[in-house]
Amino acid sequence: MSKAVIFDLDGVLISTDKLHYKAWKAIADQEGIYFDEEINNRLRGVSRMASLEIVLERSDREYSQEEKEKLAEAKNDIYKESLKELSPKDLFDHAVETIAALKEKGIKVAIGSSSKNTRTILRQLGIEDVFDAISDGNNITHSKPHPEVFLKASEFLGLEPEDCTVVDDAYAGIDAAKAAGMTAVGIGDATNYEKCDHTISDLYELVDLMEEN
Ligand code: BG6
Ligand code: MG
């Protein structure tokens, strides 16, 4: 049985897709670059700079490193402004109940997110203090599908990777979990991915799943 659940944040506990979309769309419009929701879906689980590279694929000119950094910063300023609107009611159904039930069973809970805004988001959602460990975009050099963010989470928990179960909504997250040697549970978009060990449609299904695995 796994000793811990490592939750991805965006798309697992909360949906920030629209907020990312609005911020990237503003940058793309400013630069005259085509951008739509389908391209936005490709940014799931991917770091800010890697996301920018995807946005710039549609541009007909090259950007210097300095220009890229400015664009990423401008996107983040818009995104951070929109995070101020988040509140506990934005949490997905049964997120709080699931975390509480897992802890009740002695299962540790952690966050494994590529976002550098993880702590701000958790604070806005009122759940910053419930996790035993938080591994995020600030403590990694390689973004998902690299396993680093999840390996760091298990290290922070003091557990072996094989003792951890990851829940992620992105293909990149499932790949990262498998590369880390962890059990991978897909939710949302990732339920279509054959690499998932399990799939769930509601977070609370994790409680029974953890007893079986
Ligand atoms: C991930 C999102 O959680 O965080 C990605 O799924 C995003 O879409 C990435 O690009 C980085 O986020 P941030 O907050 O560090 O810009
Ligand atoms: Mg996600």
Image (cartoon, grey):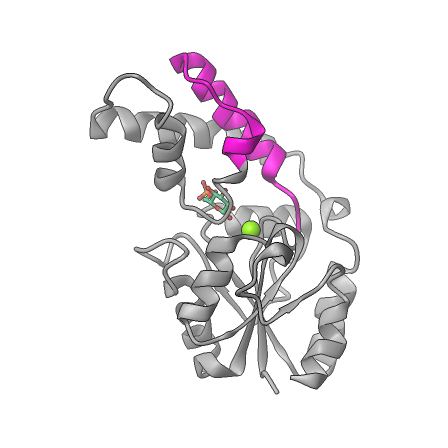
Residue 25 shown in magenta = yes
Q: Total marks drawn?
A: 0
> Which is the main secondary structure of the residues drawn in magenta?
helix
Closer-to-camera residue (198/13) = 198
State the residue lying farthest toward the bottom: 1
Above-or-below relation of 211 to 87: below
State the residue lying farthest toward the front: 194
At 52% from the left edge and 83% from the top edge, which residue is drawn?
A: 163
Q: Quadrant of the N terminus?
A: bottom right
* Residue 203 in picture, x, y percent from top left: 73, 63
Above-or-below relation of 127 to 151: above
At 44% from the left edge and 20% from the top edge, which residue is drawn?
A: 28
Q: Quadrant of the C terminus?
A: bottom right
Tell whether 97 sits left or right of 130.
right
Residue 51 shown in magenta = no
Task: Give the residues drawn in magenta, as a range.
Answer: 14-40
* Residue 4 in picture, x, y percent from top left: 58, 77
